């Protein structure tokens, strides 16, 4: 139904959004008066910590692969 490229893009977006919202609310709890630095800090931290997804062609079949700094190696998502 969905192409692997679209799924990789969707997974990248969703993982970034979840981590961004988590760090945004966490930083707003500690620094409620500083709007722009908190948003920029949350965006930077979320982009560094979010997993990276890519659509890769391997043996004629296109699959989605994930790489994350907390996991060793590259994972195949199918």
Image: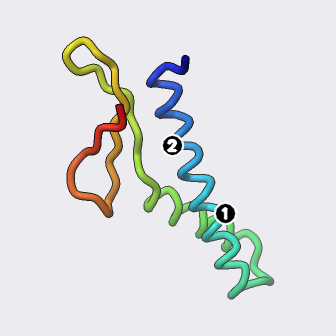
SS at circle 2:
helix
Please report the residue visible at 78 percent of the width from the left and 83 percent of the height from the top: 32
Residue farthest to the bottom? 30
Q: To which quarter of the image does residue 18 belong?
A: bottom right
Residue 34 vertical position relative to residue 55 in the rendered view, above or below = below
The N terminus - image quarter: top right
Crowding at dot 1, Cα within 10 Å, few <14 / some 14-19 / many 20+, comes out as some
Q: Earlier in the sequence, mark 2 or mark 1?
A: 2
Residue that numbered label 1 is attached to: 21
Q: To which quarter of the image does residue 63 belong?
A: top left
Q: CA distance from mark 2 to mark 1?
A: 14 Å
In this orientation, which residue lies closer to the viewer: 45 or 37? Answer: 45
In this orientation, which residue lies closer to the viewer: 36 or 3? Answer: 3
Tell me where residue 50 appears, x and y as whole percent.
46, 56
Tell me where residue 42 appears, x and y as whole percent.
60, 67
Please report the residue visible at 31 percent of the width from the left and 26 percent of the height from the top: 56
Left or right: where 19 falls relative to 54: right
The colouring scheme, among rainbow, by chain, secondary structure or one colour, is rainbow
In this orientation, which residue lies closer to the viewer: 16 or 61? Answer: 61
Left or right: where 13 falls relative to 70: right
Residue 34 vertical position relative to residue 14 in the rendered view, above or below = below
Residue 11 vertical position relative to residue 2 in the rendered view, above or below = below
């Amino acid at each position: 139904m969905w192409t692997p490229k679209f799924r990789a893009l969707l997974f990248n977006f969703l993982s970034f959004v979840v981590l961004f919202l988590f760090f945004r609310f966490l930083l707003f709890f500690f620094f409620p008066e500083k709007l722009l630095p908190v948003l920029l800090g949350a965006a930077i931290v979320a982009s560094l910590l979010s997993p990276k997804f890519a659509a890769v062609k391997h043996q004629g079949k296109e699959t989605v692969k994930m790489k994350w700094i907390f996991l060793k190696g590259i994972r195949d998502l199918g």
